[in-house]
Amino acid sequence: MLAVVPPPVTVRVPAKVNLHLAVGDPRADGFHELVTVFQALSLTDEVTVAATDEPGLEVYGEGEGTVPTDATNLAWRAARELAAYAGRPDDDDPKVRIVLRKGIPVAGGMAGGSADAAATLVGLASLWKLDITRDELAAIAGKLGSDVPFALYGGTALGTGRGEQLVPVLSRHTFHWVLAFDHKGLSTPKVFGELDRLRAEGKPPRVGAHTPVVEALASGDPRQLALLLGNDLQAAAVSLRPGLRRTLRAGVNAGALAGCVSGSGPTCAFLCVDAQAAVEVAAELSGAGVCRTVRVAHGPVPGARVVGGDDAP
Ligand code: C5P
């Protein structure tokens, strides 16, 4: 009798921007205590998982040729973790082919690698027909990386701890963004390290409380939110990549309400008053010669979801 091979599963997963990112002091485990407000954006990766006798990982789009395709890729680690959780006999080397189609910049501060890991968890849970809730997936996700649980849930959320402990935040209306991708990525540990170094020298100032940001999200007014965007990692990213100052200025000169470095950078995110303004800002910023490429996106959007299906956890 022939074994029935399940059809491949494709999952779409969003990038994130941090509307507010307050970084505390380093902890004993090397991580920093965070208070952050995440928003999931319509800039996405697509991850396809398929059962196979020849396991492997392929990458297309952003980062093609530079993203590792071996067992060090976070998506592959996600497959191993889920296989172990499910007690599958192939947990060391899961019999799956994982294809990443990337629109999220690599090492860009938008959690692209975390998104791929979250999508792999959702895809394999569906492919393997696991009886697992999204909260159970989030517990596995938290072991893989600080931003992986948020990529599962999407929307807008307050993150604490390493960023992995999440509470949903009410966000009215859709916010419109322009994203400026840089020529090269930045290493997240290096950016956190640079912030520690800057702070040892007695600067820079820290962002305020997150509550006004939460209130602005509830009001749905982009002008109010624009005044409150704040990221403690921005000074560190700019210190390592001084050209970002010019990019941030160019976005505001092009008509954005405000701009900030996204997470650990170097992607810059510009909040615009509406969809039309975002298209205009993107066009002008493209011509300013300050970045590799420009994208328009909106948020919030849902987390990792099977494409064309709603039966996933
Ligand atoms: O959790 P993740 O693997 O994404 O973190 C990457 C790196 O970023 C960590 O190794 C650490 O250097 C830094 N980090 C941190 N504090 C956090 C999150 C990340 O110092 N809360």
Image: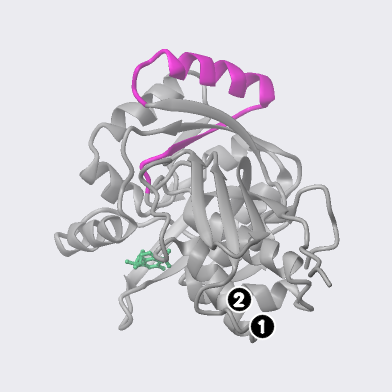
Locate residue 290, reporting x and y percent.
Answer: 34, 23
Asked which quadrant contains residue 197, the reply is bottom left
Q: For residue 28, which numbered disc appears in the image? A: none
Q: Let me know if residue 78 appears in the view.
A: yes
Which is more toward the observer, 311 or 28?
311
Q: Let me know if residue 164 appears in the view.
A: no
Q: For residue 82, which numbered disc appears in the image? A: 2
Query: CB under 8 Å between callouts 2 and 1?
Result: yes
Above/below status of 170 relative to 25: above
Query: Which residues are drawn in magenta?
Result: 265-291
Amino acid type at mark 1? Ala
As helix, strand or loop, the secondary structure at mark 1 comes to loop
Was residue 177 drawn as part of the magenta stretch in this picture?
no
Q: Is residue 191 left or right of residue 77?
A: left
Question: Which residue in the protein does label 1 denote?
Answer: 86
Above/below status of 209 relative to 161: above
- Count of numbered labels shown in the rendering: 2
Above/below status of 284 relative to 12: above
Q: Residue at x 43, y 19 (%)?
A: 253
Which is more toward the observer, 4 or 125?
4
Quarter holding ligand 1: bottom left
Q: Quadrant of the N terminus?
A: bottom right
